[in-house]
Image: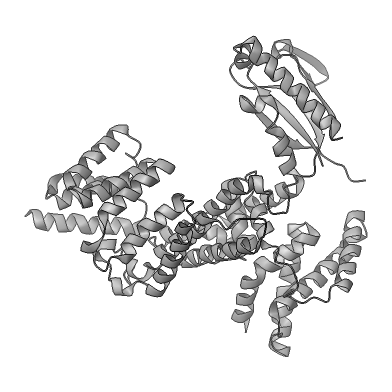
Amino acid sequence: MHYALLIYGSQTVYDGMTQEEQAKVFQGHNAFFADVQQRGIFEGGRPLQPTSTATTVRVREGKTLVTDGPFAETKEQLGGFYILDCKDLDEAIELATRIPEAAFGSIEIRPIMVFEM
Amino acid sequence: MHDHIAHVFHQEAGRVVAALYASMRDFELVEDALQDAFVLALERWPRDGAPRNEGAWIMTAARHKAIDRLRRESVLNRKKADLKTRLEREQEEANVDADEIPDERLKLIFTCCHPALAKEAQVALTLQVLGGLTTSEIARTFLVTPTTMAQRLVRAKRKIRDAGIPYRVPPAGAIAERLDAVLSVLYLIFNAGYTALLGDNLIRHDLCAEAIRLARVLTLLLAKEPSLPEDAETLGLLALMLLHDSRRKARVTPDGALVPLEEQDRTRWDHQQIAEGLAILERALAMKAPGPFQIQAAISALHSRASSPAETDWTQIAVLYAMLSQVMPSPIVELNRAVAIAMAESLECGLSLLSRLEEADALSGYHLFHAARADLLRRSGKFDEACIAYTRALELCQNNAERAFFQRRLTEIGQQAR
């Protein structure tokens, strides 16, 4: 089964880290990526720029509305994601525990929808 | 015959669902098939007599019914067609003998109590899938409408399917955590039954019996599973439930009034069940892996062993509550410890501990806090203060049997004070 592991963290928490701590998060992702890649279960994934760069688009009655943001300074924001091919939810949970942000943010696991032909 | 059939289906439900789910992985299909098999049994058993091996009959009938259902649906759906073919093959291979069907219930317990499901969903699912209770029975127990309960169950089953919650006994590394979740579900089921006993309806003793039955099944299954160590807390929970439940007949008068432990007719306790509970607790304690359920069972055991209230070893009970508050800190444990100290040492000590709890304010809305305080004040002869505390308990309490008991105390105090 394919799962999206959505990584939520707070920018303020991350900004408050020392350089060594930030480097550790970075290395954690490198190690995680190397592991899932080597096991052949990596199906995709990317880090995202902070929400200060976010743009929101809506189309209403044919009109395009573009706004800056959203910014959520205090709450956790989506910071990136992995898509992994796991045996079941337990495997996805086990992998989620190894994503660095699990220790200070949270990981949301969502099964990817499959359309039956 | 109808009652007998219903009883057998209830008893066998967990095993049959577990075995069928192992090959079908579709709760809706399994339940529909089991329901079809029930209808067939109602038709056949009275006519032909009950089959020799009732469990195997149900399993085979449900399997056939599932294949029938898949046959009807497979025209449009390739996945269902594949499943049908596989089930038919299994059916030919297995000349179904109930003793040879592997018992899959342990896997099913872990699936139903998976932490990715909400606690209330875990409880409802366990009762339905393993306990064989109907949706409306479960709904009545938890005071929600059958529609709400049905939705809750459907949502949980969809999540199991769509999120890929596995069907297996968790690996050794995760077992302790997962087992805790299972035990807490069983204890919630038990408590739902135990407190309902005090409510307006006395229907829910079945829930206590069901929780005990499932805990027994769990201990047996764990004992059979070579990859798992025997679990002291599982035994502790079983002992705790047996000991609590042994006082069932003495706890409530025939007209539904609550009888406090102190006033219970101890000859009406189920002494055979007490003996069993004590023996199981011994076994658990011998494993030297203490935990909250074993400590609570040990406390219950001290009450069970006392042949009169005066012989209760309150000193030891206070020690055990202190242990409990270390492994499972909570204001309610502190409340119980304060009461034990009041009984073991002095009412003054107990009351001062309660005032400290009151300052922390965690229990000010909890009726049993005020009731406990009222009781200690009453024993100390401080009738005016006791009256105020009982009145407060009465205001906060939702349970009619408990309310009637507080009323009784208020009347008694009124007479004594005069």
Relative vertical location of residue B209 with respect to residue A72 in this rendering, above or below: below
Color style of the picture: one colour
Relative vertical location of residue B257 with respect to residue A69 in this rendering, above or below: below
| Image x and y of residue A74, in percent | 58, 17
Comparing A49 with B168, the one in front is: B168
| Image x and y of residue B355, in percent | 24, 37
Which of the 4 quarters of the picture holds residue B255?
Answer: bottom left
Q: Quadrant of the N terminus of chain B?
A: bottom right
Q: How many marks?
A: 0
Comparing A15 with B319, the one in front is: B319
| Image x and y of residue A51, in percent | 70, 14
Asked whether residue B328 is in view, the answer is no
Asked whether residue B415 is in view, the answer is yes
Q: What residue sits 63% from the left and 22% below the top?
A: A76
Lateral position of residue B237 relative to residue B111, left or right: left
Q: What residue sits 34% from the left and 41% below the top?
A: B365
Q: What residue sits 55% from the left and 56% below the top?
A: B231
Comparing B382 with B174, the one in front is: B174
| Image x and y of residue B329, in percent | 41, 40
Which of the 4 quarters of the picture holds residue B392?
Answer: top left
Q: Quadrant of the C terminus of chain B?
A: bottom left
Lateral position of residue B210 relative to residue B28, left or right: left
Quick one: which residue is furthest to the left in this view?
B418
